[in-house]
Amino acid sequence: MTVKMLTQPKARKQAGALSYGQKLHALLEDQRRLANRLAKLIEDMEDEEDHRAIERAKKRDAGKPGIPWAEAKKRLGLD
């Protein structure tokens, strides 16, 4: 995504040419975009946290015997 930077005077001039409704619409669009970006960042952080937890569990349980599939199904009530 390319971001076009405006100097403050140019931004004020462009904003001054907009109606109140247009300014409000632009502000709400910016807020929506920022909220979407924030949600994506939070999701990425949670995914990374999950990945790290899995890696820690793999190291912690390395060499330990696993649970047979039939026993796992039974414990989970899937059998």
Image: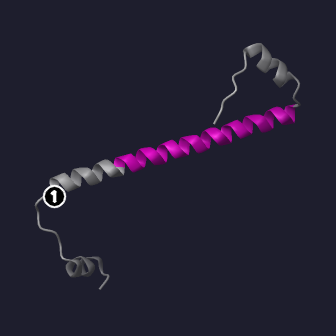
Q: How is the image coloured?
A: one colour
Q: Residue furthest top?
A: 9
Could you say which is closer to the camera, residue 35 or residue 10? Answer: 10
| SS at circle 1 | loop
What is the tally of numbered marks visible in this picture? 1
- The three-letter amino acid code for the residue at tag 1 is Asp
Mark 1, other Cα within 10 Å: few <14 / some 14–19 / many ≥20: few
Q: Residue furthest front?
A: 2
Q: Main secondary structure of the magenta part?
A: helix
* Residue at x 69% of width, y 36% of height: 30
Q: Is residue 5 above or below residue 64?
A: above
Question: Which residues are drawn in magenta?
Answer: 20-49
Q: Is residue 23 above or below residue 45?
A: above
Q: Is residue 34 above or below residue 6?
A: below
Which image quarter: residue 27? Answer: top right
- Report the side of 35 relative to 9 (left or right): left
Disc 1 designates what residue? 61
Quadrant holding the N terminus: top right
* Residue at x 73% of width, y 15% of height: 8
Percent across and percent down for residue 14 are 83, 23
- Report the side of 29 relative to 65 (left or right): right
* Residue at x 45% of width, y 46% of height: 44
Percent across and percent down for residue 25 are 79, 38
Quadrant holding the C terminus: bottom left
Q: Is residue 62 magenta?
A: no
Percent across and percent down for residue 20 are 86, 31
* Residue at x 73% of width, y 39% of height: 28
Q: Is residue 1 above or below residue 69?
A: above
